[in-house]
Every structure is written in structure tokens, then in C-alpha cells.
Image: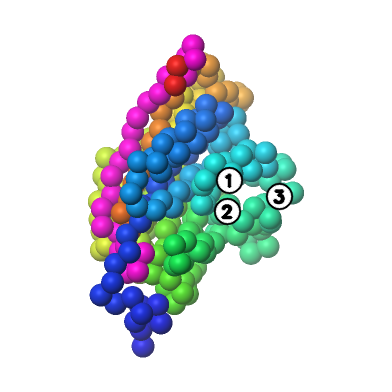
Amino acid sequence: MFPAFLIKNMSKSKQIKILFFGDMVGKLARKFVVEFLQEYKEKQSLSVFAIANVENASHGFGLTEKNYNELSNAGFNCFTSGNHIWDKKDIFQYIEKADKLVRPINYPPKTKGKGVRIFDFEGEKIAVINVLGQTFMQPIESYWTSIKKEIKKLKKETPNIIVDFHAEATAEKLCLGRFCSELGVSAFFGTHTHVQTADEKIINDEAYITDVGFCGVVDSIIGMEYETSLKRLSTGLPERYEIPDGKLIQINAVEVTLDLLSGKSLDIKRIMLERNYQEGKK
């Protein structure tokens, strides 16, 4: 038997835009992303479901409740994260009530927060799953069995499933991305490396990109200052990362056209642009 939503929606179409921003790093990144989102919505004829990875949004480490509320009020529908979402300790005080925030699903069962959320949008439902990679990452529970079960369960409720896979290794992202496409996932976005890849494509009706990139200071080492990064990498000694003072800010994002009724992605486009916040300039 087909799910009820599939029978109802056969031979129909309802297109929207999914706008997904790569890892946000720091204050000016938040400012630029909010401005861009507002400008984008004004120019867009289709409805926009906006998602941002926010695990580095508050000065490069974690997400404060203040910043969560500011971004929520700016028009975002959902926030994904990763291993750094726990870096600001007030996360444990507000994550249970942060109904737009998704943390990695493969943390132990009693971990605070949720690894999947379902959102009502345009009269339909959109599910968002956050998953943490295993290769070259901290030890974490395997996701292969659990993600398959979760997707199959969600497919009974909605055809629209979006995955943010926060992982280091390209091969791991490619493999899980194809695996998810075979299970009927609508879009699969890689995050974590902060370097936008040029391999956006449609796989089995799933929009795919290995890494969306990051939003932050252009003259930096994936969002952090060069001097600190150099000391840490050349000496092997611990150094506290800081966000550089540069005012030229970049946005890395992807735009996906999604058919809400079938859950199929029709296209995917990379977004990469810069804005100068020096001396009062945008």
C-alpha cells in the first residue's frame, strides 16, 4: 500500500526552494546570512524553507541561546549542527525548548535535544535529520542501521527528508549520500570541512553536495585566524582559535528546487558570494 500522502498527491506538483547555508562562523557571518536571506526571499517567487548549520555561529564555537533566538526571529525554519554544538554550555539549558534546532542523531539515546525534526511548511511536512560522521572524527555510535530505520519511518509520514551529514571524509559522505538516495531522501548536504565542493548533482532524485562550505571571514583558515592556526598545526601544541578581524565576508550555500508533493529534488545550485563590511560598506 502507498502512504496516504502519496496517493493524495499523485500527478500533482508543488515546488519550493530549500536554501541551506554552510557552517556559520561568527558575528559578521550571522549578519551577512540574515541580510542575504531577507534579500533572497524578496526576490524569490517560490516559498523558501531556510536551513543553516549553526554549530560555529557564536564566535566560532557552539551557539548561545541569544544567537539562537536572534536567528530564529530572522526567518530561518531549521538549524542543523554537529560536534561543536555543545561548546557553549548554555546549550544544555535551552536545547530542549529550541524547536528549530537539530543535533546529530547518533549520540547516545539519553542525549538532550533531537536528531530529527518534522516541520509543517506550506501545508506539507519536511523532515530534517542531522548525522555525525565516524571517519577521522571523535568516537560516536554507528549510523548505518539507525539512519535506515529512521528514514523508512519518516517516509510513512512525508516524502520530504533532508539530511545534514556533518563529517570529515569525502568518501564517507559520497557513500552515505548514495545510500540515502536509494532510501528516497530528498536532499543530502555535507558539512564540517568548511570548504565548498564543486560536485553538486541529483542522485536518484536526491540533491547532493559533498560539502556546502562555510559562511565567515574570507581571509582565514576555515573561519579562524591564520597565525593561531599556523602555531597549532606547525607545533602540535594547543592554541585557542580566534576569528580574524577581516571584514570581507563570504557566504557558501546551496539552493534546491524541491517538489513538496513527491519529495523529489529538481535541481541544485551552489551559492558563493562575498560582501565587504569595512568602513560602513555592506
Image position, residue 116 (x, y; %):
53, 61
Say which of 158 and 232 sits in front. Answer: 158
x, y (%) of residue 85? 60, 44
Q: Which mark is residue 3?
A: none
Give how far apart the Cα atoms at labels 3 and 1 are: 14 Å
Which of 132/257 is in front? 257
User: Is residue 136 among the parts visible in the rendering?
Assistant: no
Q: Which range is magenta?
A: 259-280
Label 1: how many Cα within 10 Å (few below 14, some 14–19, many 20+):
some
For badge 1, the amino acid type reads Ser
Q: Is residue 182 above or below residue 197?
A: below
Q: Amino acid at mark 3?
A: Tyr
Q: Is residue 269 magenta?
A: yes
Residue on which the image places disc 1: 72
Mark-to-mark CA distance, 1 and 2: 8 Å
Q: Residues within 10 Å of mark 3 (few under 14, many from 20)?
A: some
Q: Residue at x 33, y 64 (%)?
A: 14
Viewer-side residue, 204 vs 173: 204
